[in-house]
Image (cartoon, grey):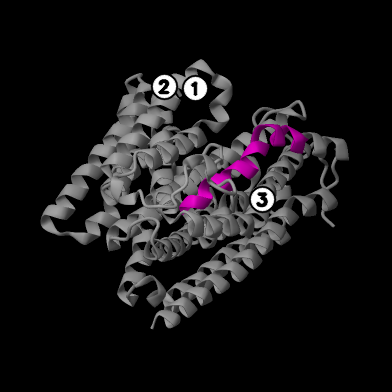
Amino acid sequence: MSTDIAALDAAYTKTTDRWGRITLLLGLLIATSVPFYLLFTVDLNITAGNVIGGFLAVAAVYGVFWVVEPLTYYPILGPAGMYQAFMIGNISNKLLPSAIVAQSTIGAKPGTKKAEFAATAAICGAALIHVISMLLLVGILGSWLVSITPPGITEIAQNYILPSILGGVTVQLIATLKQVRATVIALSAAALVVFVLLPLVPVLGAVGIALAVIITIIATWLMRPASMRGPGGRGPGSTGDGEQSSGGQVGIN
Amino acid sequence: MLLTQGSSTDIGAVANAPLLWVLALAVMGVVALQSIIYMGAVRKNAAAADMSQAEVRKAFRAGGVAAIGPSLAVVLVAVALLPLFGTPPILVRIGLIGSAATEVASAEVAARSMGSGLSGGEYDVDVFVVALTAMSLSGAMWMLATLIMTPLLKRGSAKLTEVNPALMSIVPSAALLAAFAALTLTEFPKSGTHIIAVAASAVTMGICLAIAKAADINWLREWALGFAILVGLFCAYFAHNSGLGAA
């Protein structure tokens, strides 16, 4: 029985790994070919220097996040979820909330296999809605929607959608996890970073959320209950290949 | 091929090229393909996670329902950006890695490097193509980093689980709690309206979950996020128009 389960688990990992990489690479190639098609077919008055300059300007702002975001999300998403999330985007405002809702619906605790599978299924469901909404509402009905939506409504949605999602998701997350100790630590660490550290050292703004994540992981580990203090447990200073030393602002994409 | 003067400001004429529509559909197709393959893998191997087929369906549906609210919000913003970038580029940029906020900010930064912005007469086809190239390459870097780092992180965390399973059992929840706590609190200093939106959404979620638990209504757990977003935006609308907003 246990070998069957191990075989199923291996099959899942193999399929999601291989096809996750193939589809992500395909998406990357197709999406990147869009501007190059225009660069080669439209009669433009621009130089390679303009293009490189534009890219470098964006890289200066977001370059850190290219590396730091995958690092920050890995402990939450796991390998299968990584290939989904970094293809579809909208991670903190759409995919993670979907995963949290699904785990809450079937009662799966983060960190377990069940939670991992539930998150994958949930992100598939979210992807379906994502594709349908993009094709139907943006692709087909987009121009018509532009003409009937009052600008005031769009402005409200643009400015306040993130707080309107985050308040609810955070409450649902706390209710699903039922980990009072970790919740108190996470809220305290986040408050410390956002209200004390960042106003004092504004240059840390780009890595503020990662700092909160690192502080929470270390503090939760140091204050873990006695039942988890078995032999062989290492301190938080030696956490291996860097998942925990990740930095960055979760939630750009 | 299609020849257009780069100094024209008619973005739509360039952005709606038939091949770009094909590419945009292909991108959506790849997302759908990935989801179909992944769903198959979950369904086939569900026993490995001690999960029933009913639970697999439930998780899929819950994820879809939870995504309706956020998707509609993304649509609203994407639609507002259509005149700026044209439909196929918007489908590709917002449909793949990237959120509306990131893409607009990237485009603005790239456009400024050309001495223009995203609004005004300076924004012509030349600037559009440079901005689109910059934001596309930036998105590609995110995906590339994921492709390169995920296998490395996988090896690292497998080793870590072996050496210190207790640590790895606390990391996912702690990271998730901290990320959302910090994301939420980051909204607070922005304006009073942001705080009201967070609070209204949080309270609505709390009420929905309490009712769902007390009356054992499972569908309310799935729809709660949609209600919370609606109430959050509704309260933000009134707060914003009463002058609390700093947007």
How far apart, in angstroms, are the residues tagged by discs 1 and 3? Answer: 27 Å
Number of residues whose C-alpha sits closer than 10 Å to that of mark 1, classed few (under 14), some (14–19) or many (20 or more):
some
Please determine whether, in this image, residue A23 is positioned above or below residue A37: below
Number of residues whose C-alpha sits closer than 10 Å to that of mark 3, classed few (under 14), some (14–19) or many (20 or more):
some
Q: Residue furthest front?
A: A231
Assign the N terminus of chain A to one quadrant of the image.
Answer: bottom left
Assign the C terminus of chain A to one quadrant of the image.
Answer: top right
Specify the subunit that label 1 lies on. Answer: A
Judged by its main secondary structure, the magenta piece is helix
Q: Tell me the kind of residue under disc 3.
A: Ala
Residue A70 among those drawn in magenta: yes
Label 3 close to label 2 by CB (< 8 Å): no
Q: Tell me the kind of residue under disc 1.
A: Leu
Q: Which mark is residue A198?
A: 1
Q: In which quarter of the image is residue A129?
A: bottom left
How far apart, in angstroms, are the residues tagged by discs 3 and 2? Answer: 31 Å
Which residue position is annotated with label 3?
B145
Q: In which quarter of the image is residue A245?
A: top right
Which residue position is annotated with label 2?
A195
Specify the subunit that label 2 lies on. Answer: A
Q: Residue furthest left?
A: B215
Label 1 close to label 2 by CB (< 8 Å): yes
The region drawn magenta spans A54-76
Helix, strand or loop at mark 1:
helix
- Taking depth in this image into account, of B215 and A21 the one nearest to the observer is A21
Q: Is residue A233 visible in the rendered structure shown here?
A: yes
- Taking depth in this image into account, of B171 and A161 the one nearest to the observer is B171
Helix, strand or loop at mark 2:
helix
- Provide residue A240's location: percent of width, then percent of height: 57, 48
